[in-house]
Image: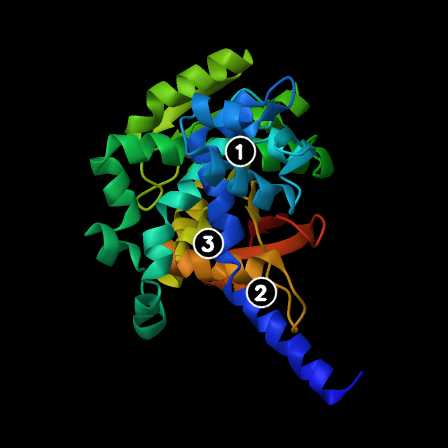
Amino acid sequence: MHDTDQREDHAYRLIQLAEGFGAARAVQLAAELGVADLLAGEPRGAADLAAAVPAHPDALYRLLRALASIGVFVEVEPGWFGLTPVGERLRTDHPQSLRSWVIFQGLLNTVYANAADSIRTGEATTAHVFGEPLFEHLRNHPEHRALFNAAMAEQSRVTGEALAHYYDFSRARQIVDVGGGNGAFLTAVLRANPELTGVVYDQPYLADDVERQLAAAGLADRCGFLPGDFLESVPAGADLYLMKGILHNWSDDDARAILANCRRAMDAHSRLLLADWVVPTGNGPHPSKFLDLTMLFVYGGRERTEAEHAWLLAEAGLRLARVVGPPSMLNVLEVVPA
């Protein structure tokens, strides 16, 4: 390859990286417009879809054409589009729907647009954009809270089903899911392990959501809800404590406080499972490395390496026993008292 060709390849690569937001926003727009719901069953023409959305026919066609080029939709014949297996998950009624998750990412676009604040200060941009930290904003804005809870439930269902099948829960009897949201993650674990019982421990305003989730899953007799704040305390008495995607939302100081509360609740035989990303060392690509930036911009938190997890746990009187799970997705960090 000539030097000129190499320079052009490098330039086009940088241009592609800089324009990456275009694909993300296109997927978000398709989710917001509900296009996938309209395509359930069979392909439809762009003009027909535009009348149903409603949208400008040519503009919608261009959106669908762009998304077909990256495998979200498929143009089955000129101007007619159908769903791919990826696009199916934008349907509201799909059992593994991620529509709310995608729409929530769109809500954060203003945060990302102002993220230089986080790089300059090391603090979350959310407080600057929303006028308050994210969790306070969610408490004060029910419509955003409902979207956030739905998004987290969708993500938890997907990851919960995966984690439930590659971690052996057979030694446990009762699980406390610390910061368990609406209970979607614990639901997946309990479904895969019928001998287990559980408790979802989270903010009081989530009580109704948890009750609906457990009732719909047929688990109301095996699982309950306990209100509380893990920054203040964690309920004692369980042999297994679970936290999925909690620590990465918080600074080291707050994460250490949460872990110390878990340690006080645990007895000598209790275990703590952290379902979290583990950032690998080296320059190789990994989802956690960009998710780490999202944690900074949105929450003021961070993703951590295995060594950083081990240090944080030791500070709270805990010990990292092992890391389970494939390196390309969430891991389970099994933690025991030090």
Front in this rendered view, residue 279 or 199: 279
| Mark 2 element type | helix
Give the numbered dot on residue 248.
3
**Residue denoted by label 2:** 16
Q: Is residue 245 above or below residue 307?
A: above
Residue drawn at the location 64% of the way across and 30% of the way down: 83
Q: Nearer the viewer, mark 2 or mark 1?
A: 2
> Disc 2 residue type?
Gln
Is the C-beta separation of discs 2 and 1 under 8 Å?
no
**Residue denoted by label 1:** 98
Spatial CA distance of label 2 from label 3 is 29 Å
| Mark 1 element type | loop
Front in this rendered view, residue 70 or 88: 70
Residue drawn at the location 41% of the way across and 17% of the way down: 211
Q: Quick one: quadrant of the N terminus? A: bottom right
> Disc 3 residue type?
His
Q: Position of residue 152 (x, y in %)?
A: 46, 36
Residue drawn at the location 39% of the way across and 47% of the way down: 261
> Disc 1 residue type?
Leu
On screen, residue 85 versus residue 206, left or right, reads: right
Q: Earlier in the sequence, mark 2 or mark 3?
A: 2
User: Which residue ends up furthest to the bottom in the rendered image?
Assistant: 3
Q: Position of residue 327 (x, y in %)?
A: 70, 54
Q: Earlier in the sequence, mark 2 or mark 1?
A: 2
Q: Earlier in the sequence, mark 3 or mark 1?
A: 1
Q: Position of residue 227 (x, y in %)?
A: 33, 29
